[in-house]
Amino acid sequence: MRLLVIEDDPLIARSLDQALTPLGNTVDVFTHYAQAHEALQSGQFDLVLLDLGLPDGDGLSLLAELRRRGDTTPVLILTARDGIEARVEGLDLGADDYLAKPFSLAELEARVRALLRRSQQRADNRLAFGPLAFDAASGVATLDEQVLDLPRRELLLLEGLLLHAGSITPRETLENRLFGFGDVGSNALEVYISRLRKRLDGSGLRIRTFRGMGYRLEEVSP
Amino acid sequence: MSIRCVALVWLLGALTPSLAWADNPLIVEAALDREVAAPLLDAFEEAYPRIQLTFRDHSTLEVDARVADADDPPDVVISSAMPWQMSRVNEGYAQRLDSTAAREWPEWAKWRDEVFGFTFEPIVMAYRLDLSRHMMPPKTHADMHTLLTQHRETLRDKVATYSPSRSGVGYSLFQQDARYTTRFWDLVAAMGAADTNLEANTRAMLEGLSEGRYWLGYNLLGSYAMVWAQSHPEVIVQVPQDYSLVMMRMAFIHRDAPHPAAARAFLDFLLGREGQRVIAGETPLFSVRSDVEGPYTAQRLRDQVGERLYPIPLNASLLAFVDPSRRTAFMERWQREFHRLSHPAPDQSAAATESPIRPDALAAVRRPGYGVVLPTNDSPDDME
Amino acid sequence: MIEVEGSLKARLAVWLVVTVSALGVLLLVEAYFSSQRAAERAYDSQLEAAALTIAEAIQWEKGQPVVEIPSAALQILATRHQERVFYAVLDADGHTVSGNLDLGISPDWRRRVSSQPTWLNDSYHGTQWRLYGRELDSAGWETQDPVQIWVGHTMSGRDALTETLFEHAVTRFVIMVLLAGILMLLAMRVALAPMRRLRHQLRQRDADDMRPLEARVPEEMREMAETLDSLFTRQREGREALLRFTADASHQLKTPLAGLQTTSELALKSDSPDAWRQALTEVHGSAGRTSRLANQLLSLARLRHAVEASATSRIDAVALLHETAFDWAQRDASQAHDIGLAPLPASPQYIQGEVWALQELLGNLIDNALRYTPAGSVITLGAVNHAQTLELYIEDDGPGVSPEMLAHLHHPFERGGRQDTEGSGLGLAIVDSIVRRHEARMQVESAEKGGLRVRLLFPCLTRHEEG
């Protein structure tokens, strides 16, 4: 993946470079508005990490211009501006996510991964998380390249979890997906979750329950 | 007066010769001898050739009657019967004249800017040259009284004056005389004792003097007398040295004047410099304006006679003279005084010739009890 | 925002013009009528005099009244203005003894005059006349019949005198108004002098001069001066509070920074990679705490010193709680804890508030719970709808806080008697500020399971307010 980092603080810029390159990305770093502007016009990137406070311009106007051109490249805003207004404005202008400084690198990596995955999924119509994958066109799920033969409701559940992989899928969403809007027993969903859990056992993936909220498909921490 | 009106009058004046008065008739009803007024009328016709002037010369009575004639009112009314003119104005028969000449006209010679005294005619005594062979001719009213008392027999039937009953002018003059001094009644008594002749107009008195019938005349219109004396050397005109009444001929525009514009032009001419100049130079009427030159000007008269000229005041007091009961009272007194020193007092029938009031005459002129009373047998105060 | 709305002078001038015009109209109307009355009195007395003069001249002969109208009477009637004049002397039967015009004295008028002298206005041939009649008792030898004397004249003199008097009144009034206007301007200059002085004084003040005013002001301006003074006082207090806070805050920041400095210094002196690793771990942890501290300080400062209240809006508090819980549950910091939602009310629950502040509020409470409870603790968020209030709560099953410390929890830098955690003690202070901004109440109490339960009680929007 090709990443564009626009960040004027050299320390942070270097950290970002060093953190993101090992994940298999090509990282271009620019510290000024003008350079970034030029780079955005000429090159194609998979993700832009944008700092708002640049010495020679406002990052938001760069974002606005990008979206005006119809460029849908995902943009993650990094800023020390601590105002809800700045955040709302950024999202309004078409930013995909927002991270306030200071942030932990782990948090950043997670967000970057999620954004890249989302843009990837949009690109090839295929859901994937770790060893698990689901082709929406054919309706075939694979784990470690092995086709998983799943009943319909488990397949629906898997697809629902994969759609939100890495974040919590609300319980209501999954219930609607599996049972429609009809009334359903409180532990009906739990039954299918536990079935799916068994299938994922040992795959390095697990389904975590969030009390009162929903479920999350996540990688088992090393 | 508004500026618009001034402008209008000026404009009318400016347009006069060309078109404004084309075929414009103008009727002037006047108690003023046409012959005397002729130069004035000629001058007017010259100045306003398009105005067709009709000058009707009548007695004061006729003039006054014509004022009230609703069917055929005149445009301009001129009369020497000052109280009667005044009375008509008071009744509202006049209309205001708004013009420069009217505004500048002396206050003492106009009333309400409606009626204007445009001549200045002194009242004089006149005597025949023969008189001076018998006695010192009178110079004052007192002289007159003395002569009548001391030479009563010599002067018997040789004195003439106005009849107060037959002449409005005469009546006014005697009223005015009586206002100035009570000794006037002594004069009346003395005249009565000398069998003074009572004439209806100045002309009759002047003719009597020339013919030798009269030696002495009292209260003649100076304007006519002076002209007469020029052609009749036997007649001497004496302006009284103690005081001399001055009569003014009064002119006003009739309220219902059919030709008001022409009437205004005529009156303006009378009051204007040109008209007054003609009056001063070519008529014996004497001009009122002080800015004109000529043999007959009020100013010149003043220079000759001094300040003893007493113009009959042109104000509301004149109205009293035409009050019927006042007139009655005055005439009664006149009769009493006139006969006081003469032979046995005449009975009522004898006095009837001088009776001031004839009810039928009053009725003919006015509604009973109101307004102006004119003697019925008055004749023009002009030389005819 | 200061908006200039006219000037005092203009305002006073408008008032003056309006009142003076209204008053002026009244005055002028009054002046006109009083001028008319004055003119009437003046000329009526002339009529009276003329009538008397005529009365003097009446005599009786043979039982009949006889009058020789005196010229003077007519001149009095005519006046300077050369009025047209009328006179009539009527006998007891109403017959004219003497007179000049027929103005038609009606029997009715004669009756009125027989009781008392009377003035009348009448129109004759389109001209207005003023008439006066009086009755005179006869003193004749033969008869005692009374006679009536009527006099009258036109009214141009009255009109002229009325006009003159009215003109004088108008002139006086205009002069008075002009003088009053000038005096008002002068008076305003004098009256506004204290205000100019005060303005001058304020203009000369330094921007940071918050001392009380020292100015002599009139009574009317005392309130304004006092308001200014109290404004200065509040600003002074606010600034002092800010200074204190800044001092506190920098003190708070200095401590972790000192730790960073010493740790890194020691690590640099060491040659052991193990020691470096140890030091870097400490530095990393401390940097995180420090930035969090800085964030909280900023939040607190913003909350306490925000001049402009952000626009509040109607917020579904349940949805907000739901969203915030999801957000926090997925954070790295939460992975060691069991964050969950209690069953929420099915319908939206609306309160009036600011979204960012409420998120900050809930976030701080969750953050606090995460920090002050051991790993594995259960943290539950929930919402309960009471009749007039909506309760949002967060409870944990951690060690809790002793009852005596509960009261002090919301003071800045207070950590509930604990120095063993990573917290700064600012969390609850921020929470407290936000709660007060929302006119809500916060109750901190021990939970049933032994941990802490924080209850936030918001006033519900009534249906009317929702509309």
Image: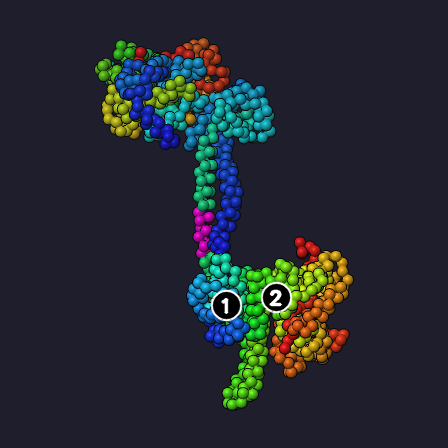
Q: Residue at x 75, y 57 (%)?
A: A182
Q: Amino acid at mark 1?
A: Arg
Q: Which residue is mark 1?
A: A2
Callout 1: 10 Å neighbours few (<14), some, many (20+)?
some
Q: Is residue C128 visible?
A: yes
Residue C181 image offset from top left, x and y in percent: 46, 51
Q: Is B17 displayed left or right of C381 in the figure?
A: left
Q: Chain of mark 1?
A: A
Q: Is B339 displayed left or right of B135 in the figure?
A: right
Q: Nearer the viewer, mark 2 or mark 1?
A: 2
Q: Is residue C119 magenta?
A: no
Give the magenta range: C175-187
Residue C434 image offset from top left, x and y in percent: 63, 68
Q: Chain of mark 2?
A: A
Q: Amino acid at mark 2?
A: Ala
Which type of secondary structure does the marked residue at label 2 adopt? strand
Residue C14 image offset from top left, x and y in percent: 49, 50
Q: Which residue is mark 2?
A: A128
Give the dominant element type of the magenta stretch: helix, strand or loop: helix
Image quarter of the N terminus of chain B: top left
